[in-house]
Amino acid sequence: MDSVLHYADEHVFDALYAKLIPTSMAANATSEFAINWTRDNVLRQSLSIFIMVTLGGWFFYLAMASFSYYFVFDHETMDHPKFLKNQVRLEIECAVSAIPGFSLLTVPWFVGEVNGHSMLYDGVPQDLKGWLYLVASVPTFLFFTDFGIYWAHRWLHHPLLYKRLHKPHHKWIVPSPFASHAFHPVDGYMQSVPYHLYAYLVPMHKWLYVFMFVFVNFWTVMIHDGNFISHSHIINTTAHHAVHHLYFNYNYGQYFTLWDRLGNSHRQPTDEQYDANLRNDQKVMAKQARDAELIEAQDELKAKKKAQ
Ligand SMILES: [Zn+2]
Ligand SMILES: [Zn+2]
């Protein structure tokens, strides 16, 4: 984030803030605000990062989800009885309004990074060991964050949190790629904490971290794109996440099925996901809709009993 902020300061924010702060104020030596509004001012850093993360979030979300919607997503999915009227518009509205709140919660992590409090490092690796460490950072990052997201997601399904925080993301029983970031801001934030935590606990190259951040967003869109190419039992595929949206209490993982297997929440997708003819069969869809309603009703009843 420090290099990104430095670039943005150079090309946008220096000029923008100079324009926004009245010249009379900037020239006034007694004006604390004008004097301190320099690149190392934490408030200025926070505002700049908030603007960047919000604009970047909107851009990546709309670009990736649009691409997936037009080129990858199986549009027959929209005939499912659980695909809501105007769902795509509702998903976009939900995501676009969630991203600023989500960005705001994320700002302290990035401000800490910019001021050197994380374990992110810079520079070209000097020897084979350095290169091997760089390569090994990818699986360790995925392994660590998958573990964190599994538990964050599983807790978000706890009756105490579900209704308030995670239910908005489960409004989409049959999601489109635009459902990827359509969540409550605190829900999205809770599931992003493992990424930030990793950067504060384990040394990682900063450009690899940026790359992984983009990849994570790409993956999040991909597991909602309704295109079930992979039949893997190890990777948490689009089909696995489709099962999660249909039947709620399975497949909480993000990248792998490992934690779901250990946590007894794994449910391998079937031909109802993999076979396009079966998947788009009216009778199969109607049965899925009934099953989803039944599970949702049972979960609500359980939550009510717990609250009593
Ligand atoms: Zn969920
Ligand atoms: Zn989802």
Image: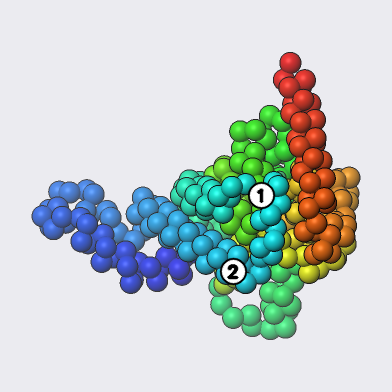
State which quarter of the image contains the C terminus. Answer: top right
Q: Residue at x 58, y 57 (%)?
A: 178
Q: Residue at x 22, y 62 (%)?
A: 18
Instruction: Tell me which amino acid carries mark 1.
Output: Phe
Residue 85 rendering spot, x and y as whole percentages:
59, 47
Horizontally, is 12 left or right of 25 in the view?
right
Q: Quadrant of residue 203?
A: bottom right
Q: Residue at x 71, y 51 (%)?
A: 80
Horizontally, is 287 left or right of 185 in the view?
right
Residue 6 rendering spot, x and y as whole percentages:
40, 68
Tell me if I can see residue 140 in this picture. Answer: no
Residue 113 rendering spot, x and y as whole percentages:
51, 58
Residue tagged 2: 70
Instruction: Tell me which amino acid carries mark 2.
Output: Tyr
**Label 2: how many residues lie within 10 Å, few (<14), some (14-19) or many (20+)?**
few
* Secondary structure found at label 2: helix
Closest to the observer, 178 or 84: 84
Spatial CA span between label 2 and label 1? 17 Å
Residue 226 rendering spot, x and y as whole percentages:
71, 61
Residue tagged 1: 83
* Secondary structure found at label 1: loop
Closest to the observer, 212 or 6: 212
